[in-house]
């Protein structure tokens, strides 16, 4: 459903007479009037469409308010899929339209009239990105650690020790990265200026899971190569815990590598 809006350059209707149950110039029945004056009206018609009409000669600059409202509506249609949430968001835009047109009619500045709608959209977009972030992280973990866990469970008796340790390290590192993502997922911020933000959120979580897998396996390689805690390399529980920490912390392995390079 797309909102149909128009602003007329000539005053041709008495908006005080437009009310619930009457019909606008497009012969659409008005079901709710958000606000009006003798120079403008903001209203809803059947189907939940938001519409407005104004006398451009009396509401100078109304086209700018109209353009801002349309941009917000378009952004909302991209982010908000739930009908009830979108209806609430559209009500906020309608209220902003009334305030903006009223200010312009009184020759006042109409700044900040859509702040409530913008805040609603920002909060909703952030929750959407957070959902994509968590779901992508969980799916990435299933696709990476899942097959390795199955291989380990079915063949652990036949796997050579070093490969067993690598599997344990990679699996533990993957779950460490997942825990790190789940703890910090609320900090996933939306990029409202681009509609590709969701792709970046998904890509970020996928890359972080893969990095956790690599860090966990790399820690085992450092241990097997005699560069790190060699005395505990036969303790699988210790190795798994250490690999989990390596996957959880983004700084641990880079710091260890930097120390090895320094030496």
Image (spheres, grey):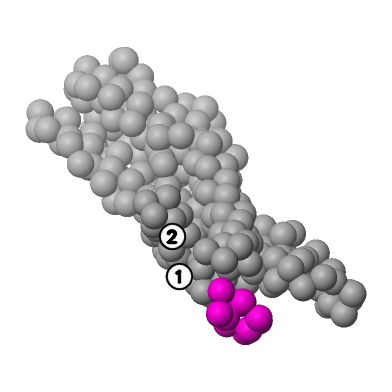
Residue 256: numbered disc: 2
- Foreground mark, 1 or 2, reads 2
Magenta stretch, overall SS:
helix
Using the rendered image of the protein, determine whether residue 153 is visible from the camera's viewpoint.
yes
* Circle 2 crowding by C-alpha within 10 Å: few under 14, some 14–19, many from 20: some
Residue 24: % across, % down: 46, 32
> In percent of the image, x 23 and y 42: which residue is there?
113
Quickly name the residue at label 1.
183
Q: Which residues are magenta?
A: 230-241
Q: Earlier in the sequence, mark 1 or mark 2?
A: 1
Indicate the position of residue 92 as horizontal and vertical percent values. 35, 50
How many neighbours does mark 1 have within 10 angstroms: few (below 14), some (14-19), or many (20 or more)?
Answer: few
| Residue situated in front as seen by the camera: 14 or 121 | 121
* Residue at the image position 41 percent from the left and 42 percent from the top: 191
Question: In what quadrant of the picture does the C terminus appear?
Answer: bottom left
Viewer-closest of 66 and 253: 253
């Amino acid at each position: 459903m797309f909102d149909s809006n128009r602003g007329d350059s000539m005053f041709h209707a008495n908006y005080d007479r437009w009310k619930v149950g009457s019909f606008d110039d497009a012969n659409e029945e008005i079901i709710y009037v958000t606000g009006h004056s003798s120079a403008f009206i903001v209203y809803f018609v059947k189907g939940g469409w938001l519409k407005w009409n104004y006398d451009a000669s009396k509401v100078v600059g109304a086209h700018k308010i109209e353009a801002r409202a349309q941009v917000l509506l378009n952004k909302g249609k991209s982010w908000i899929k739930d009908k009830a949430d979108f209806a609430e968001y559209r009500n906020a835009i309608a209220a902003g339209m009334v305030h903006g047109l009223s200010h312009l009619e009184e020759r006042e500045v109409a700044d900040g009239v859509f702040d409530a709608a913008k805040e609603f959209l920002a909060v909703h977009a952030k929750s959407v990105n957070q959902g994509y972030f968590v779901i992508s992280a969980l799916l990435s973990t299933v696709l990476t650690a899942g097959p390795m866990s199955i291989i380990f469970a079915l063949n652990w008796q036949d796997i050579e020790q070093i490969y067993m340790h690598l599997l344990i390290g990679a699996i533990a590192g993957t779950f460490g990265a997942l825990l790190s993502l789940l703890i910090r997922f609320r900090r996933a911020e939306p990029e409202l200026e681009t509609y590709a933000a969701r792709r970046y959120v998904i890509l970020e979580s996928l890359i972080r899971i893969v990095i956790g897998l690599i860090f966990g396996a790399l820690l085992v390689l450092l241990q097997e190569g005699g560069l790190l805690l060699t005395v505990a390399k036969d303790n699988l529980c210790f190795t798994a815990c250490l690999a989990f920490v390596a996957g959880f912390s983004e700084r641990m392995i880079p710091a260890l590598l930097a120390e090895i390079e320094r030496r």
